[in-house]
Image (spheres, rainbow, N blue to C red):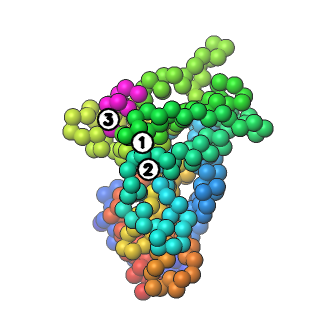
Amino acid sequence: MMTAILARTGTFVMVAILLEQAKCVTSLASSVPPVFLPTSQSAMIKQAASAIQTALLDDKIHLQTIRLPLSEAMYSESEEGFVADRAIGWQGGPQETYRYLSPLVRQLLQSVDTLGGGSNAAVLPRIQEQVMLDFDGSALMTSESPAGPLGDAQALIQPNTDAYYYPKTIPTIESQMVVQSNGTTVSRLFLLVNPAWRDVSSFGFLAPKEKVQRDLLDTYPTTYAVDQFVVRGQKCSLLKVWPHDWCVFVSNLPYDNDNNGDKSLATFLGSFEERPPYNVMDELILAALQKKN
């Protein structure tokens, strides 16, 4: 058991949180989050591009994982708009999610300045799209930088745990993103967008766990993510923006009687070095509800 003190508007609430991963807690009850939940798609794209650039240019992380929300429900204040996100993500199939993700990834690749210094400020990168497995809703999107091939980037959309993606396709693309220039090795940006896995358990019992952990989970850190859930009737959002920690936000669903039809603003509940499990978010929201009542 870990006792946490949640501060909200000068009131302190004592909450017992079952948190085996207690060491991953960065802050609870801070009134000002390190980053803010975006309120539009354009704001999300701008925020995601900044996170990707920071990881790439400042920290030399050219292999990255990003997770984008699967519906405009993120920005909607209508009950109907949020239905798609009630469970984990989308109620349609992978082909439907791909059709939604494709234009978002296109905008994102055109927004990322892979070489820095405004290398694509005047002319946007040229985007090419290649469907990988149609029934999987997967595709490879290539961004050709106007500054030259060293600034090119690729994004593999919706890879899953099938062997077609790993150990086959992903390592092949990864090797192609490393090139030689004037005797120097240059690693170009390669993104995994909304992969189907969360951890090694996603790959089943026969997968080589240590190899998966090393080659995918450790090699492709999450640099940007927006995940959404409904927890205790509240809209819970997880936000990761590199180099900041995972942030937990909550807001009333529009059909909550206490909301009175007013547009609700997301409340910051805390940040974590690692992605917090569901039970931690549940405890945080329970504490917030108890305080409200």
Of 16 and 152, nearer the camera is 152
- Residue 173, above or below 221: above
Query: Which of the numbered marks, if any, corresponds to residue 96?
Result: 2
How far across and down, in percent of the image, does residue 162 sit? 32, 35
Residue 208 in view here: yes
Query: Which of the numbered marks, if any, corresponds to residue 22?
Result: none
- Kind of residue indicated by mark 2: Glu
How far across and down, in percent of the image, does residue 265 sit? 57, 73
How far across and down, in percent of the image, does residue 259 sit? 50, 83
Q: Residue at x 42, y 53 (%)?
A: 275
**262 left or right, relative to 174:** right
Check contact, mark 1 vs mark 3: CB within 8 A. no
For disc 1, the marked residue is 137
Q: Secondary structure at mark 1?
A: loop
Query: Which of the numbered marks, if any, corresponds to residue 162?
Result: 3
The mark total stands at 3
**215 left or right, relative to 176:** left
- Magenta range: 161-169
Residue 38 magenta: no
Lower sequence index among marks 1 and 2: 2
* Disc 2/disc 3 C-alpha distance (Å): 19 Å
Residue 62 in view here: no
The quadrant of the picture occupied by the C terminus is: bottom left
- Kind of residue indicated by mark 3: Asp
Of 288 and 45, nearer the camera is 45
Q: Can you tell which quarter of the image residue 14 is in?
A: bottom left
Q: Residue at x 55, y 51 (%)?
A: 241
* Disc 1/disc 2 C-alpha distance (Å): 8 Å
- Kind of residue indicated by mark 1: Gly
